[in-house]
Image (tube, coloured by chain):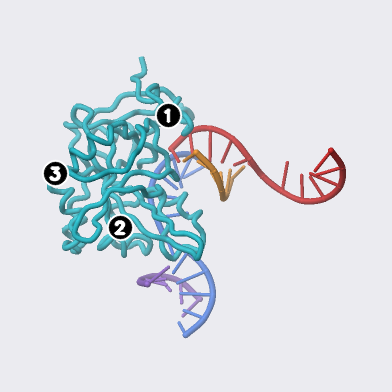
Chain colours: A cyan, B blue, C purple, D red, E orange
Amino acid sequence: MCGRFTLTATKGTLQEQFSLPFPEFTPNYNVAPSQQILAIVSGGNEKKAGFLHWGLVPSWAKDKKIGYKMINARSETLDEKPAFKRLLSRRRCLIPADGFYEWKREDDGKTKQPFRITIGNGQLFTFAGLWDKWRTEEEEYFSCTIITTKPNQLMESIHDRMPVILEGDDQDIWLNKDIEDKHILKNILNPYDANNMSAYPVSTLVNNPRNNNEACIDPLS
DNA sequence: CCAGACGTTGTT
DNA sequence: GTCTGG
DNA sequence: CCAGACGTTGTT
DNA sequence: GTCTGG
């Protein structure tokens, strides 16, 4: 699955890469569920970048707390689940990142070793996500979830799920509002190429979501 | 018809 | 909101 | 994902 | 154990 990631790039890099204005943000070495994360959505005829709370709160939810359980959505069943089905056609988003963490359960069955996974030369990439808007008389709450898939050859040694990563044309398809065919959309939700991905162990400092500094991404010696 | 669920992961 | 179960 | 809390009453 | 918070 995907329950933690990094976005250490600067606002300038993001703006250049996506040709979009981005709001101010600080580099984050330990992005955790419930936090506000940067996302790109299709607004009107244009793309738009802004913050969404990580942990999907469907529009019909009675209580925001459901979001703590909805940090991921399985790509295989996206078009069947009531919480996600309706979002697949009209509420897709991309979530920029430059690494993500997965915890590997050691053979003793108790301890877990965190790994950081990166793409290419540590370059920026995007997760495929879905978003929704929840509102009461007092507030509006925008939230999102990250889509997962089965692991590629590299990831299966660490965990049995991995986030869906989109690049190039697939990013355009995902944000194209004219495309609503679920077969076309589901067809791009695949495990990323293991040959362009690397994983390295990191300190358990990353376990605590309050730790947010370069030590989180330092390779374990 | 109304009531009630709506999710993923990991662990047992 | 939308679907499943009774 | 992991960390950390998990409770009520009465008094200050 | 289970739920909330980050």
- Which-is-in-front pick, marks 2 and 1? 1
Residue depicted at 22% across the width and 34% down the height: A13
- Which-is-in-front pick, marks 1 and 3? 1
Compare residues A111 and A206 and report the one nearer the observer.
A206
Compare residues D2 and A64 and report the one nearer the observer.
A64
Residue depicted at 38% across the width and 61% down the height: A83
* x and y, in percent, of residue A190 in the image: 21, 46
User: In the picture, which quadrant includes the N terminus of chain A?
Assistant: top left
Parent chain of label 2: A
Compare residues A205 and A97 and report the one nearer the observer.
A97
Parent chain of label 1: A
Whether residues under marks 1 and 3 lie with C-beta atoms below 8 angstroms apart, the answer is: no
Q: Amino acid at mark 1?
A: Asn
Q: Which residue is mark 1?
A: A212
In space, the residues marked 1 and 3 are separated at their CA atoms by: 30 Å
In space, the residues marked 2 and 1 are separated at their CA atoms by: 32 Å
Q: Amino acid at mark 2?
A: Leu
Compare residues A89 and A1 and report the one nearer the observer.
A89
Q: Which residue is mark 3?
A: A168
User: How many C-alpha atoms fall within 10 Å of the one at disc 2: few (<14), some, or many (≥20)?
Assistant: many
Q: Which residue is mark 2?
A: A78
Mark 2 or mark 1: whose residue is earlier in sequence: 2
Residue depicted at 16% across the width and 58% down the height: A184
Residue depicted at 33% across the width and 29% down the height: A116
Residue A55 falls left or right of residue A11: right
Q: Amino acid at mark 3?
A: Gly
Q: Secondary structure at mark 1?
A: loop
* x and y, in percent, of residue A101 in the image: 35, 33
Residue A147 falls left or right of residue B1: left
